[in-house]
Image (tube, rainbow, N blue to C red):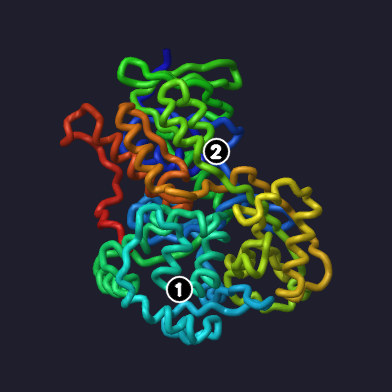
């Protein structure tokens, strides 16, 4: 039987990140991916001079571990920074119009986005002395600390637009961990932000938002091609079983069935796939994973001549609160964000429809999805004429929903894993859905595996991302 020290099942960003950190530390690692290509939902498509992203379109980073990975993987020269316009402005749909959202706290409080009552409630946040009960939702958390207006006009569209989730059902501790920690540590979000800003000047990395020349696929391609990452595509894992202190894993491969024994197994698959593989090993763990729901999502990419768009497109795009749009959650102005996303004299607009707000979108045909997106955009952006390019990307299971008592669910998953030495679950249903979160979680699982190796600690290689300060909030 073939053997490897670490087998990663799933070649999306979570699996590739873990494999890269391990390979960088000299650990033999094999990656089995069921698809014909690595990267999972992250994919970049070029057509007629337009560069479109199938899922994640940028990376917001403030962590030194991620900076170290990019530097050591040779990706620093490939980074594409946001344009100056995209750094200066964001919009929110309110009253059928796009209104700018100030990025500075003083301007935010003075903005006409908020009523006088809403502004006073926001300023009163330091005087709120209540604490979060277990399992508190995002809606309850934000309303308790900042008021209902802040929820309806800011946080609800943020949760719907970036997480495809329902703020009324989303676990605040799981979806907004930094805000929840600010309250836990300082009793106030405002006080926590102030302390954080003072400390950050001395310890934390600067925050930067960027993509890559050639799109986000540049990142996954670089990780997959790194020395020591033994990627095998077309390998769909069909069975896992404990085997003499390790794990026996069988896959359906292009040349037939293949079985491999691994000392450490990382399941970097969606929760339903992991549940199916673990059902015969731990029914309780499998049930916990089966209880995780996913949101469907459709992306509509529209390419137009610049003169066909009356709006200045002087920002990143806009988010849409549920009271303003029942189906469309947001729109990104990709050609304003990054200069290489559209040909000269053209613009690229990417709309997001569905999520937990409108799961019925999964049943619509492409024509209806495109019509809904354009119907919403025409008056807001003063669109004239039809797009010269239209592309629709569908995801039946776009993002895991951190709904219900999600933090408690993840604690129960962690407890069950203690009974299965050498088994690790790393996918975006644990620890955050952003690309930054997935790279960080890859580093963390690599650290755990390195710590468990039988070789003397003095000779044990480590992922080279230090110094790693405590998480910044």
Q: Would you identify the image quadrant in which residue 194 lies? A: bottom left
Q: Where is residue 357 in the image (x, y as percent from the top left)?
A: 62, 56
In the visual, does 70 lie left or right of 468?
Answer: right
Q: Quadrant of the N terminus?
A: top left
Q: Residue furthest right?
A: 385
Q: Which of 213 and 239 is in front in this view?
A: 239
Residue 463 shows in the view: yes
In the foreground, 473 or 281: 281
Percent coordinates x, y for residue 16 in the rendering: 46, 40
Q: Can residue 212 be seen in this view?
A: no
Q: Identify residue for label 1.
A: 147
Q: Which residue is drawn at 67% across and 66% down?
A: 325
| Mark 1 touches mark 2? (CB < 8 Å) | no
Q: How many labels does the image show?
A: 2
How far across and down, in percent of the image, does residue 360 sit?
Answer: 70, 50
Foreground: disc 1 or disc 2: 1
- Label 1: how many Cα within 10 Å (few below 14, some 14–19, many 20+): many
Which picture quadrant has residue 285?
A: top left
Eyeballing the image, is 405 above or below 26?
A: below
The front one of 348 and 119 is 119
The residues bearing labels 1 and 2 have C-alpha atoms spaced at a distance of 43 Å
Residue hosting label 2:
38
Q: Position of 288 compared to 390: left or right?
A: left
**Residue 274 in picture, x, y percent from top left:** 48, 31
Please report whichever mark, 1 or 2, sits nearer to the chain's N-terminal start: 2
Q: Is residue 465 above or below residue 416?
A: below
Q: Is residue 43 above or below residue 198?
A: above
Q: Residue at x 26, y 57 (%)?
A: 470
Identity of the residue drawn at 46% across and 58% down:
77
Instruction: Kindly state the secondary structure of the residue where label 2 is placed.
Output: loop
Q: What element carries label 1?
A: loop
């Amino acid at each position: 039987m073939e053997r490897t020290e670490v087998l990663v099942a799933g070649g999306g960003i979570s699996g590739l990140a873990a494999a890269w950190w391990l390979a960088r530390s000299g650990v033999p690692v094999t990656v089995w991916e069921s698809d014909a290509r690595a990267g999972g939902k992250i994919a970049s498509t070029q057509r007629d001079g337009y560069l479109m992203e199938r899922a994640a379109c940028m990376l917001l980073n403030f962590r030194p571990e991620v900076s170290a990975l990019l530097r050591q993987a040779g990706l620093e020269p490939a980074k594409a920074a946001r344009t100056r316009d995209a750094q200066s402005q964001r919009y929110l749909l309110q009253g059928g119009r796009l209104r700018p959202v100030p990025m500075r706290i003083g301007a935010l409080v003075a903005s006409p986005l908020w009523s006088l009552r809403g502004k006073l409630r926001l300023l009163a946040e330091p005087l709120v002395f209540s604490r979060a009960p277990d399992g508190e939702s995002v809606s309850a958390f934000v309303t308790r600390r900042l008021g209902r207006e802040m929820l309806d006009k800011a946080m609800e569209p943020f949760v719907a637009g970036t997480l495809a989730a329902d703020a009324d059902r989303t676990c605040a501790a799981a979806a907004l961990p930094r805000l929840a920690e600010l309250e836990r540590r300082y009793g106030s979000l405002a006080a926590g932000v102030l302390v954080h800003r003072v400390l950050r000047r001395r310890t934390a990395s600067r925050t930067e938002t960027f993509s890559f020349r050639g799109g986000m696929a540049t990142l996954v391609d670089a990780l997959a091609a790194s020395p020591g990452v033994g990627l095998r595509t077309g390998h769909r894992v069909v069975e896992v079983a404990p085997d003499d202190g390790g794990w026996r894993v069988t896959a359906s491969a292009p040349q037939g069935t293949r079985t491999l024994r691994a000392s450490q197994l990382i399941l970097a698959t969606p929760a339903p796939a992991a549940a199916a593989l673990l059902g015969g090993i731990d029914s309780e763990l499998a049930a916990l994973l089966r209880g995780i729901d996913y949101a469907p999502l459709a992306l509509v990419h529209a390419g137009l001549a610049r003169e066909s768009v009356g709006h200045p497109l002087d920002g990143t795009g806009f988010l849409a609160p549920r009271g303003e749009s029942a189906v469309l959650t947001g729109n990104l102005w990709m050609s304003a964000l990054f200069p290489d996303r559209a040909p000269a004299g053209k613009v690229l607009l990417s709309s997001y429809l569905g999520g937990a707000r409108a799961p019925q979108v999964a049943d619509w045909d492409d024509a209806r999805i495109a019509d809904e997106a354009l119907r919403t955009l025409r008056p807001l952006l003063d669109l004239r004429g039809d797009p010269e390019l239209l592309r629709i990307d569908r995801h039946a299971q776009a993002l895991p929903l951190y709904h219900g008592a999600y933090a408690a669910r993840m604690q129960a998953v962690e407890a069950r894993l203690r009974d299965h030495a050498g088994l690790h679950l790393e996918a975006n249903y644990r620890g955050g859905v952003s690309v930054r979160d997935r790279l960080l979680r890859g580093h963390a699982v690599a650290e755990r595996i390195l710590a468990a190796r039988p070789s003397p600690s003095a000779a044990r290689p480590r992922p080279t991302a230090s110094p790693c300060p405590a998480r910044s909030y």
